[in-house]
Amino acid sequence: MSWRTWREAMTDALYGPAGFYRTAAPVDHFRTSVHISSAFARGVLQLARLTGLRTIVDLGAGRGELLESLAALDSELTLVAVEIRERPLELSERIEWVPTMPTAIQAMVVANEWLDNVPLDVVENGRLVEVSHRGVERPGAEPSLRDNVWLAEWGGVEVGHPRDEAWESVVGRLERGVAVAIDYGHVRAARPKEPTLAAYRDGRMVSPVPDGSCDLTAWVAMDAVAAAGVRAGATRTLLTTQREALTALGLDGGRPPLELATADPAAYLKALARAGEVGTLLDPNGLGGFSWLVQAKGIELPVELG
Ligand SMILES: C[S@@+](CC[C@H](N)C(=O)[O-])C[C@H]1O[C@@H](n2cnc3c(N)ncnc32)[C@H](O)[C@@H]1O
């Protein structure tokens, strides 16, 4: 049996030649905000408009769902998907599809549920956790000095510096613009003392086995990532929740007026369904509780965001 640290095992299981993300479409295994409702895209578009940015880069674009919604909402935007998967055959022609983040861009970058898939190590009882191909764990070597420095500064048991580096690289590639990381996250004061590493397959949570058969994910240390963005030149930073951000960007989960039910039953049902979707995006115990890290470089953040 070969043993690897979780970071090594996760890298191979997600992005190696037979890795989960080489073949699997995220939507077949779990649903993110972009699948719930095009209202999410409306919020993203509003942020782009308020900042005057006309290029939107979707980092870790999945099957391009967010960009398709944006394409339907605004015919003038430049839309770029950054994704290691193959370009979907049915994708609109106007969406550019590239495997790596472009450099020196003036754009709004959106990374929805991307950072949680950046592989990282887990430390328990002062040892790196090692894992077999079948998901059996054992204590491994001592963490590196770098790991220990990170854990001392940010706390928890999952060593987040690979996420910090990933985000530093994203903000570093912005010449001028806004980068938004949206994810399930925590900050130091509430950092869990147990690992959050989890796995999903076919819409269900399964036990984490690094064999390429499932998504492997762990919560994101959003405050550490924010600090990395500042190191990469972010001049403004806002860390808030999806509920706060999308509400500030104009989403309203209120039910339609009852009179509409008699005046125009079809419109009422449509509006009711839409309100339900927005409610799901704003649910404080679900997607609404996700973190939004919004960082600007060389421009101001809109006052509407607070
Ligand atoms: C959890 S999915 C999220 C997909 C989409 N953003 C959504 O909200 O549904 C993460 C996606 O990021 C992609 N990905 C991960 N690392 C990447 C990288 N370094 N460059 C480009 N795409 C990446 C994966 O292939 C996967 O499609």
Image: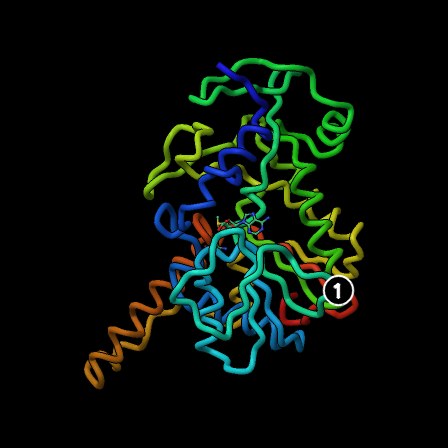
Q: How is the image coloured?
A: rainbow
Q: Residue at x 50, y 38 (%)?
A: 17
Give 84 or 158, whichever is nearer the viewer: 84
Amino acid identity at mark 1: Ala
The extreme bottom residue here reads 263
Give how far across and how far down residue 212 sits, in percent.
44, 34
Give how far across and how far down residue 301 sits, in percent.
70, 68
Residue 214 vertical placement versus 68 (above, below) = above
Task: Mark 1 and ligand 1: say if the CB distance to the nearest ligand atom is below 8 Å.
Answer: no
Q: Quadrant of residue 191?
A: top right
Q: Secondary structure at mark 1?
A: loop
Q: Residue at x 63, y 71 (%)?
A: 304
Numbered disc total: 1
Residue 106 vertical placement versus 103 (above, below) = below
Q: Residue at x 59, y 26 (%)?
A: 122
Q: Quadrant of residue 276?
A: bottom left
Q: Residues within 10 Å of mark 1 (few under 14, many from 20)?
A: few
Q: Quadrant of residue 68?
A: bottom left
Give how far across and how far down residue 31 sits, in percent.
39, 51
For label 1, the residue is 104
Give how far across and how far down residue 181 sits, in percent.
60, 54
The extreme front residue here reads 17
Give 67 or 282, whichever is nearer the viewer: 67
| Quadrant of the frame with the C terminus | bottom right
Residue 240 appears in the picture as rendered: no
Residue 260 appears in the picture as rendered: yes
Q: Give the left or right position of residue 144, taking residue 282 as reference.
A: right
Residue 289 vertical placement versus 39 (above, below) = above
